[in-house]
Image (cartoon, rainbow, N blue to C red):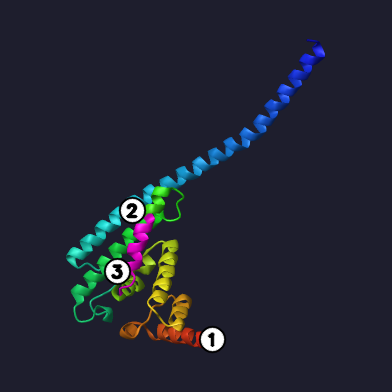
Amino acid sequence: MTSPDLQFIKDIAQIVNYLALSVTGPLALFGFLRAKKQERADREYRIYDELDNKFLEYQKLALQHDLELIEVPDYDPRLGSSKLRKKQELVANGIAFSLFQRAYLMFHGQSDQFKQRQWRGWEQSLMNLLRRYSVRDAWMVCRPHYDVKFQDYIDACLVATMRDMGAEPCEIYAFRKTGLLVREETWHLFNKDEQEAWERAKGDYGKKAA
């Protein structure tokens, strides 16, 4: 084999090597960045998990000893005639929402098939729970305590549940616009500004539909 032939082979080998590096280099960088992102997400979830465990314990303690946990003092009209029972109901629903929030952060939107299967079960249970008016009322009280994305998710589930149960379109529109969920039995629980905002939103829907 002549020297030019050897040089030609070396040149080809060098080109192939450069091409391989040009492909594997970005792939390696992408893999590194993805691993760092997952590492950060895992670290954030561990922190959340530890805090959430403590919060759940606090909620259970409040439930056992009638502590003021979710800013519903004894004179609040939301408690009705049975103050202790209503407080226990609110705190119990708050615990349920905390558990669903944990499942949401662990499973919702995941690509892994196992997590998708797990989330479907949680989601079905959540949708069944939201059909109860007492749970919806509790969400109005507990809502500010949860992750913003989880708040948006529950609100979207409430809209779907309201539609499924035949709620008036104007009420669904008012809920989406105001974040309030008002019904005849709970009208007196909202202040004047909230009542006016609710009625105004329902009126706006009527104008749009006309």
**Looking at the picture, which amino acid does disc 3 mark?**
Ile
Which-is-in-front pick, marks 3 and 1? 1
Q: CA distance from mark 1 to mark 2?
A: 46 Å
In the visual, does 91 lie left or right of 16?
left
Q: Secondary structure at mark 3?
A: loop
The numbered mark at residue 51 is: 2
Q: Which mark is residue 209?
A: 1
Q: Secondary structure at mark 1?
A: helix
> What residue range appears in magenta?
119-132
Residue at image location 37% in from the left, 47% down from the top = 46
Specify whether residue 12 is painted magenta: no
Q: Quadrant of the C terminus?
A: bottom right
Disc 2 residue type? Leu
**Residue drawn at point x = 36 percent, y = 56 percent:** 103
Looking at the picture, how far across and down is residue 48, in whole percent? 37, 52
Apparent side of residue 210 relative to residue 190 in the rendered image (left or right): right
Is 39 in front, or is 121?
A: 121
Numbered circle sitting on residue 168: none
In the rendered image, residue 116, in percent from the top left (x then y), is placed at: 41, 53
- Choose the circle earlier in sequence order: 1 or 2: 2
The N terminus - image quarter? top right
Q: Earlier in the sequence, mark 3 or mark 2?
A: 2
Query: Decide: marks 3, 2 in contact (CB < 8 A)?
Result: no
Q: Is residue 121 magenta?
A: yes
Q: Position of residue 53 (x, y in %)?
A: 29, 53
User: How many neighbours does mark 2 have within 10 angstroms: few (below 14), some (14-19), or many (20 or more)?
Assistant: few
Q: Which residue is mark 3?
A: 70
Q: Is residue 27 above or below residue 159?
A: above
